[in-house]
Image: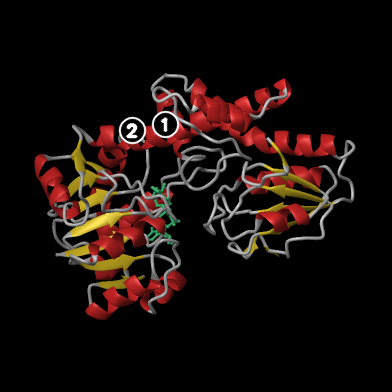
């Protein structure tokens, strides 16, 4: 069987590498640079080893392409393209739309189309199927299924093999073929009764995290006002063996999923006349955390930061990855600059970002730790400025939440 995977980013490349152990995989991406790098055996994604790509290329089980016609004789086409928000923070399906056009215009026989991109319930049935059909020859009838991706980049204990995978087809045949495909490289497949359940479950998983992070961020502010440690209080609550799950406060939420997916759920809820008050407020609380942190730093430093050299440590959205999408560091830096600070940042995993480069760790008046990578030495952080504010709870001896 030949599998085409549209989009060779975090999700598409990860799945390509697993699938290429059992199938012939063609990884289609519209970014030529990504395709050329992949075909020379170089991975651009954390958690996907270059050696695994090189091996699959050598055995002929994987190739990347930017030629849409290369997907024409596939048996299964997987969609793994971005689903961001528009500037008005509404669901933006233009990449899915483009992927559907590619499938419709290029696939020459009936195939199984599986969507792995995250989107609101109804996307497979009411958007993907009609859009592919709009661009396909009338004689070709495809099968459609959803299997939302749950990959956590940089994580080693859970991967494609041992993370349970939800799926549902628009028909019994689509469900069966989807199961046959994933069962080759995934141990635990969970069929649900409709694509809408699978789509909603994926959104709810990330909304659950978003709301709980917002709650703990609010609690961090309450704990500070009470003069108690948020971390000690959370550890104390966490001794309860049931009914409690510990989340950690921080500078906000980042990445492609948690700041974005709940808005897809809120948008569809509001379209159905249900106010998504909780989700919208959680989003605001998480966004406001950066302002709260900067207000604490300002208060500790004589009421203003004018002309002070402030070093932000860690601009990736989470530890040990280089991904800066939606990173909370962006808002922290914006608020620090608004307070008159001269801001630079240190993050050797990210290297360059927004036209600026990582600077050495040290020589600052004030250091604010937003993300603590394992390789960054705690003692060096403490020595980098006379005042260090840690938003991660990992730098012992620093000021913090
Ligand atoms: N990154 C994660 O951790 C994660 C986890 C679970 C689900 N998801 C979801 O998976 C989807 C993909 O996310 P990602 O993180 O892999 O994105 P990504 O930005 O890492 O990769 C997307 C790739 O798709 C390519 N692309 C965009 N439009 C294309 C088109 N029309 N044709 C071909 N290629 C195209 C881009 O060039 C890019 O290489 C999103 O819906 C996301 O929400 C992501």
Q: Quadrant of ligand 1?
A: bottom left
The reply to whether residue 51 is visible in this rendering is yes
Residue 256 placement (x, y as % from top left): 48, 47
Residue 31 placement (x, y as % from top left): 44, 67
Q: Which residue is painted at 14% across and 60% down in the image?
A: 109
Residue 114 placement (x, y as % from top left): 24, 50
Residue 67 placement (x, y as % from top left): 33, 71
Q: Which residue is painted at 33% across and 72% down in the image?
A: 53
Q: Looking at the image, which is closer to me, 299 or 228? A: 228
Q: Secondary structure at mark 1?
A: helix
Q: Which residue is mark 1?
A: 265
Q: Which residue is painted at 27% across and 74% down in the image?
A: 56
Left or right placement of residue 356 versus residue 132 in this view: right
Q: Looking at the image, which is closer to me, 95 or 138? A: 95
The reply to whether residue 106 is visible in this rendering is no
What crowding class fits label 1: few (fewer than 14 Cα within 10 Å), some (14-19), or many (20 or more)?
many
């Amino acid at each position: 069987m030949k599998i085409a995977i549209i989009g060779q980013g975090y999700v598409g490349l990860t799945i390509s590498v697993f699938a290429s152990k059992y199938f012939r995989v063609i990884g289609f991406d519209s970014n030529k640079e990504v395709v050329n790098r992949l075909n020379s055996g170089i991975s651009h994604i954390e958690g996907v080893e270059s050696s695994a790509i090189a091996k699959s290329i050598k055995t002929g089980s994987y190739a990347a392409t930017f030629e849409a016609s290369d997907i024409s004789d596939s048996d299964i086409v997987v969609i793994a393209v971005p689903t961001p928000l528009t500037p008005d923070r509404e669901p933006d399906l233009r990449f899915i739309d483009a992927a559907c056009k590619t499938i419709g215009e290029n696939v020459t026989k009936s195939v199984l189309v599986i969507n792995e991109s995250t989107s609101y319930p109804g996307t497979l049935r009411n958007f993907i199927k009609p859009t592919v059909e709009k661009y396909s020859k009338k004689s070709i009838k495809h099968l459609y299924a959803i299997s939302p991706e749950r990959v956590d980049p940089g994580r080693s204990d859970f991967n494609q093999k041992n993370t349970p995978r939800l799926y549902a087809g628009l028909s019994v045949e689509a469900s069966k073929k989807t199961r046959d495909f994933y069962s080759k490289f995934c141990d635990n497949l969970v069929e649900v009764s409709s694509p809408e359940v699978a789509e909603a479950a994926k959104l709810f998983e990330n909304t659950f995290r978003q709301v709980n992070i917002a709650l703990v961020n609010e609690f961090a502010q309450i704990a500070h006002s009470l003069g108690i440690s948020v971390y000690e209080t959370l550890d104390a609550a966490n001794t309860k063996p049931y009914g409690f799950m510990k989340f950690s406060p921080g500078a906000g939420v980042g990445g492609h999923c948690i700041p974005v997916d709940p808005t897809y759920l809120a948008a569809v809820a509001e379209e159905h006349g249900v106010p998504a008050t909780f989700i919208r407020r959680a989003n605001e609380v998480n966004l406001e955390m950066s302002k709260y942190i900067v207000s604490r730093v300002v208060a500790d430093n004589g009421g203003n930061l004018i002309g002070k050299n402030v070093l932000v440590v860690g601009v990736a959205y989470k530890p040990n990855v280089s991904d800066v999408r939606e990173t909370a560091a962006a808002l922290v830096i914006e608020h620090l600059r608004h307070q008159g600070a001269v801001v630079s940042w240190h993050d050797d995993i990210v290297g360059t970002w927004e036209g600026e480069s990582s600077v050495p760790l040290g020589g600052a008046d004030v250091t604010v730790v937003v993300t603590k990578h394992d390789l960054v030495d705690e003692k060096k952080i403490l020595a980098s400025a006379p005042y260090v504010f840690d938003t991660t709870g990992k730098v012992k001896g620093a000021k913090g939440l």
